[in-house]
Image: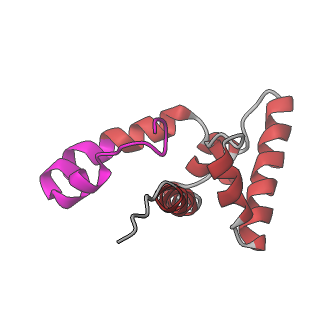
Amino acid sequence: MFGPLGPTLAPYINSSRSLQKWVKPIATWYANSMGYRKYGFKYDDLLIEERDDVQRALARLTPAEQYDRGFRIKRASQASVMHAPLPKESWTPESEDTRYLATHVQSVEAEDNERKMWDTMHVTRK
């Protein structure tokens, strides 16, 4: 899988203090330059909703998470219509930009892989 849910070096980088010291400022700069925080988004709000696994993961969110996601999308749409980012105090701070959907998507993928394994299992009689 490619994209934001694809292979990542984050666990390896986080396990090394020296690598984390060098890479963290670059990652923070890159996340800030992407501009999604200026519109109030979190990183997982950018996942493509048309994928089946993401659709099933979205259904697993709590009602509060679903409401917050919808609010962020509506607020960003309004800012886009106004052709200006949100006021600085409404931007998503780095501390609140957490991965709330990735774990659900990964569990959906694990279930799909398990289902595929059981569906293609060959039974041999003794």
Q: Which x, y percent locates residue 76?
A: 77, 42
Of residue 56 and residue 29, the one placed in the foreground of this image is 56
Q: Nearer the viewer, residue 123 or 68?
A: 123
Task: Decide if residue 91 is in sight here.
Answer: no
Residue sticking out furthest to the top:
83
Residue 41 picture location, percent across and down: 65, 48
Q: Residue at x 22, y 53 (%)?
A: 12
Tell which of 98 and 7 is nearer to you. Answer: 7
x and y, in percent, of residue 101 in the image:
59, 58
In the figure, is residue 13 to the left or right of 10?
left
Q: Determine the main secondary structure of the stretch shown in magenta.
A: helix
The magenta stretch spans which residues? 1-25
Q: Residue at x 58, y 35 (%)?
A: 35
- The residue positioned 78% from the left and 72% from the top of the image is 63
Q: Is residue 87 left or right of residue 7?
A: right
- Total marks shown come to 0
Q: Is residue 4 magenta?
A: yes
Percent from the top left, x then y, of residue 34?
53, 33
Residue drawn at point x = 34 percent, y = 45 percent: 8
Q: Is residue 78 left or right of residue 109?
A: right
